[in-house]
Image (tube, coloured by chain):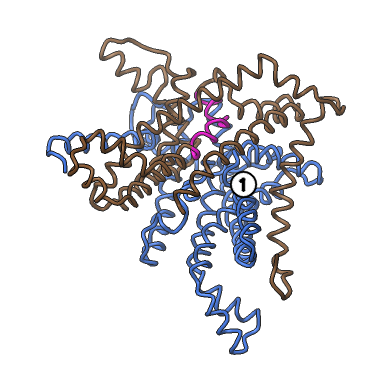
Amino acid sequence: MKSKGKSYYLIPYYLWIALFVIAPVLLVIYYSLFDLDGKLTLDNYVNFFTPVYMRMMLNSFWYAFLITLFSLLVAYPAAYLLTRTKHKQLWLLLIILPTWINLLLKTYAFIGIFGTFGPVNNFFDLVGIGEQQILFTGFSFVFVSVYIFIPFMILPIFSALDEMNLSLVDAARDLGASGWTTFRRVVFPLTISGVRSGCMAVFIPALSLFMITRLIAGNRVITLGTAIEQHFLVTQDWGMGSTVAVFLIAIMALFMILTGSSRKGVRG
Amino acid sequence: MRSKNKNGIANIYLVLVFVVLYAPIFYLMYYSFNSGGTMHEFEGFTLDYYREVVGDTRLMIIMINTLVIALLSSAIATVIAVIGALAIQHVRSRRAKNTLLSLNNVLIVSPDVIIGASFLILFTIVGIKLGFTSVLLSHVAFSIPIAVIMILPHLQEMSPTLTDAARDLGATRRDVLTKVILPIIKPGIFSGFFMALTYSLDDFAVTFFVTGNGYSTLSVEIYSRARQGVSLSINALSTLIFLFTILLVIGYYYLNQRKNKPMMHTAEPVAEAGVPR
């Protein structure tokens, strides 16, 4: 595997892989086999397939799906339009800038914006819809999450669109394809790798968000992330928490294999 | 390609996206000056909350903690990442290289909750007390892969003939590293350090799992304050952080401009985007 010569200096990196990449995964799997009293058992896995956890899992998937879908719907046109602007690198930087501001602060802002006396409710009052309970609903959770994730969706799609050969679009138009057909048959397939990367960058974190659910959704929405946090830090049932984590890791691995194999082809 | 009219709609859409992206941030900043104490009725201008933030010793200690952790962890992570990039470069077989790269990227794609929970188990088993050490170790751990990804392209672009030439001219392994390789990959090392820094400053979920009682970083503190409801000192704090972030970004942009490369092509887009922390 290695060429001749001493390679002792590589040890810290391999040590990091062993201690912080491989060991944690094994430990999570190991812990998932113990119940609250420290007895070796498969109960956690049996519990995971009860309606309570299954509903939570479906819920979590449904919300992650919605968040990914809405992020994509907002981000694709935005990324497309960004590639058409002058100084696009500058605009892109402005899109990325909010991601460098602490996630919690942005989430906190929505407590004010969506609050009972906040600007959104003021607006609703003004147009005659009347006051609505926006905070602590599924809607606010999806909205804030989409808000948080949009830059992560725009970025890869922008890169894909930017690398696309524009003469292909012109060719399609010259050959008589309508705008929609050109998009559907030429532009979108050529940028699918960006869309995949974007979906991956959104879907997995969306499954595991717990601070947004706590701050914005007021425990109405329980995701896999919330469950893990709850088990580890509140109820101290590390075994069950680990079991949920094992499933999340499995989903993640599956997702990476699915998106990874197709991405290789595009990069070629 | 498009008519004027369509362009108008397109511009409105883009402007709308920008407005929505920035509205919450400016909303926070605006109300940080509100003497009314709420985030919905602006009564009068005041700097009270800034005074509160500056005068809050606990908060100051937490900020220093956050900065110390960020600087220290990124420095350590960058050093190990240089080694890591060399290790990946060092491996000859394609399969082993891919395996190593996948292992490297595990922590980038893993959800924070998993990283946090598994590190919590690790530290408990090894017997490391939760607090400064556990937070520092976690930050080093999750910063390494991103720094490796920033450094690796520079190493791959480097012509192997350079090191061969140096060896032929009698340079020792150490000389090759310090006089040839490191100067060439310096831009990558800097962006790696910077990314690690922003990751560390931003991290909430992982830190939340591995901080014990009594030790806190800014994100964890903001979370616990935000859970108690609206307090305009958080707004004042966020305004200060926003300004600080802009300074950092300008610094990073300047660094990238100097390399005369468009910013987004230095690394993989997903890696650049990373997983929000």
Q: Is residue B76 visible?
A: yes
Residue at the extreme right: A39
- Residue type at numbered disc 1: Leu
Q: Position of residue A55 (x, y in %)?
A: 61, 16
Examine the image and state in which quarter residue B166 appears.
bottom right
Q: Is residue B274 above or below residue B262?
A: above
Q: Is residue B49 found left or right of B12 in the rendered image?
A: right
Seen at 47% across and 53% down, the residue is: B268
Near mark 1 (Cα within 10 A), the count class, few <14, some 14-19 or many ≥20, is many
* Secondary element type, mark 1: helix
Of residues B41 and A259, the one drawn nearer to the viewer in this rendering: A259
Q: Where residue B147 sits: x, y (%)?
A: 56, 57
x and y, in percent, of residue B42 in the image: 34, 27
Vertical relation: B188 (above or below) B183: above
Q: Colour of chain B?
A: blue
Residues in magenta?
Answer: A200-216
In the figure, the brown chain has which letter? A
The reply to whether residue B144 is in sight is no
Of residues B138 and A64, which is closer to you in this image? A64
From the image, which quarter does the N terminus of chain A lie in? Answer: bottom right
